[in-house]
Image (cartoon, grey):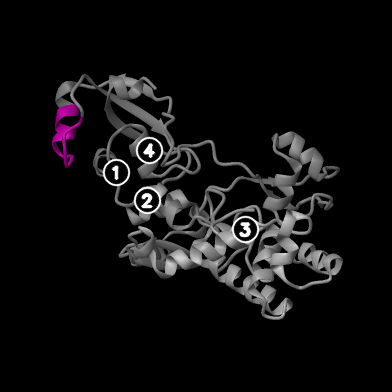
Amino acid sequence: AKGFWQLMRPTAVEQGLKYDWYIDERSSPEKSTAAAVKYLKYLNSRFDGDWHLALASYNGGPGTVQRAVKRKGKADFWPLAEGRQFLPREYVPMVLASIVIARNPGHYGFSLTPAELPPTDKVTLPGPVDLRRVAEWAGVPIDEVQRLNPELRRWTTPLGSTSFQLTLPAGTGPVVEARLAEVPPEDFTSLQWHTVRRGETLQSVANKLKVRRTDLAEANYLSARARVKPGQRLVIPRAPTTLLAAATDRPEPVVAKARPATAESMLASAPSAEPSGELNRVTYRVKRGDTLSSIARAFRTTVARLRSWNKLTSDRLMPGDRLTVYTTRAATGH
């Protein structure tokens, strides 16, 4: 069971929620609430409008309640729960008590303030997109993107989706949509791929790549027993080992002592001053999945400084590019 409504996976899928390697909509408060209401309505109709039995079914399963009714010969929750011989007793009374309190919270010593959700934007993505890339485009921490999309289980939106709706802070949607229109699709994500060779199986590929076979299968929408064919492309189910916007790991730079005057002049053109200390010039080679934001975080600097130091006219980076970074000894010692 998972999520606000503690839905089991099969029940959630039956009620229309999506579950795969990339997504678990039980973690979405909005979507799981709609599914829970749908399921409760179904249980209520199954037990002829008896909400007590419907609630007991929600807790223990409709099969358990039906067997208890058959054994006891009565379709009444209270006799069934008496002595706990047929049904557990606690759940239904607790729900009923919660309803009584919610209808008159002040009478029972509660002070409730209705919660207001912050405004958000919805952006429809044409394919899988790396959440770090979205965070950089939107100018927000990646944690904020993940918080607004709790159903996402990975660092990327679903591989097989061509219309996934991503929730973003209000005002950032148009910015992300503009970037999606101008950036090549191959730069949307940092997925790693493996091309199947003759004689390979899911298990042998998993062993070679040092990943679990079930993860390899699920990430590619395959069954664990599926056969793969030569030339078939498989996404490798592991997070990129390159810099993450939310990571604390630091790159291993090649350090060359900078002339004080040159470093100072470069810093003077930046929007704010670097931390005090002896400055060093660092040459960093861009890896797949890196963004200006993630590199700036790693070196404890800003995207604006990176653009200034390297005279960049766009945010697009290619693996193998070399960037010059001015930093302190403390920042390069990680």
Badges 2 and 1: C-beta atoms under 8 Å apart?
Answer: yes
Badge 4 element: helix
Q: Say which residue appears at 73% left-offset and 65% top-offset.
A: 79
Residue that mark 2 sits on: 136
Image height check: is 249 above or below 48? above
Question: Is residue 306 among the parts visible in the rendering?
Answer: yes
What label does residue 91 carry, if any? 3
Q: Considering only order in the chain, which callout, 3 or 2, is on the residue closer to the N terminus? A: 3
Label 4 vs label 1: CA separation? 8 Å
Residue placed most toward the observer, 46 or 193: 46
- The disc labelled 2 sits on which kind of residue? Glu
265 in magenta? yes
**Spatial CA span between label 1 and label 3:** 53 Å
Q: Is residue 301 above or below residue 281?
A: below
Q: In terms of secondary structure, where does tag 3 sit?
A: helix
Marks 2 and 3, how far apart in space?
45 Å
Depth check, mark 3 against mark 4: the one in front is: 3
The residue pinned by badge 1 equals: 303
The question of residue 58 being in magenta is answered with no
Spatial separation of the CA atoms under disc 4 and disc 2: 11 Å
Q: Where in the figure is residue 81, as x and y percent of width and height?
A: 71, 60
225 relative to 128 in the view: left or right: right
How many labels sit on residues?
A: 4
Span highlighted in magenta in the image = 263-274
Q: Which badge, 3 or 4, is on the more N-terminal residue? A: 3
Q: Nearer the viewer, residue 144 or 231?
A: 144
Question: Sequence-wise, which precedes: disc 1 or disc 3?
Answer: 3
Q: Which mark is first along the chain, 1 or 2? A: 2
Dot 1 falls on a residue whose secondary structure is helix
Q: Which residue is mark 4?
A: 295
Viewed as shown, does residue 85 lie left or right of 44? right
